[in-house]
Image (spheres, helix red, strand yellow):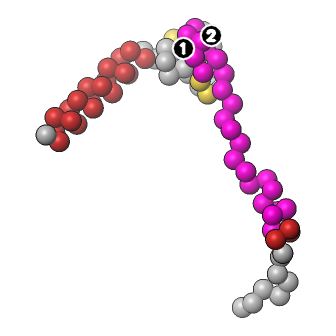
Amino acid sequence: MVVRMRANRAHRDNRRAHHALKASRLSVCSNCHKAHLSHTACLNCGMYRGIKVFDAGKKLAKKEKKQKSKQNANK
């Protein structure tokens, strides 16, 4: 089928005016003063609203261990 009333460029672009992606808003950690996503725990120190949510050092060590084992498997 053929479109009976073709939308011209102006109508098409006006419709798509709200499709642009917005930049994510960042907050500053009150503990380590690093930027993090709003309403989420800080990935650097593991704090959320003054409460320790997870151990960031432990998580980092686990990630490094995984990368080392992956590198050893590739060799």
| Mark 1 and mark 2 residues within 8 Å of each other at the beta carbon | yes
- How many marks on residues? 2
The kind of secondary structure element at disc 2 is loop
Q: Residue at x 58, y 8 (%)?
A: 31
Write the start and end of the magenta stretch as one range.
Answer: 12-35
Residue lying furthest front in this view? 9
Give residue 74's position: percent from left, percent from top.
17, 42
Q: Quadrant of residue 11?
A: bottom right
Is 66 drawn above or below residue 19 in the view shown? Answer: above
Q: Amino acid at mark 1?
A: Met
**Residue 71 seen in the figure:** yes
Q: Residue at x 62, y 10 (%)?
A: 30
Is 12 drawn above or below residue 43 in the view shown? Answer: below
Residue lying furthest bottom in this view? 1
Is 1 drawn above or below residue 21 in the view shown? Answer: below
Q: Residue at x 22, y 36 (%)?
A: 70
Viewer-side residue, 55 vs 43: 43
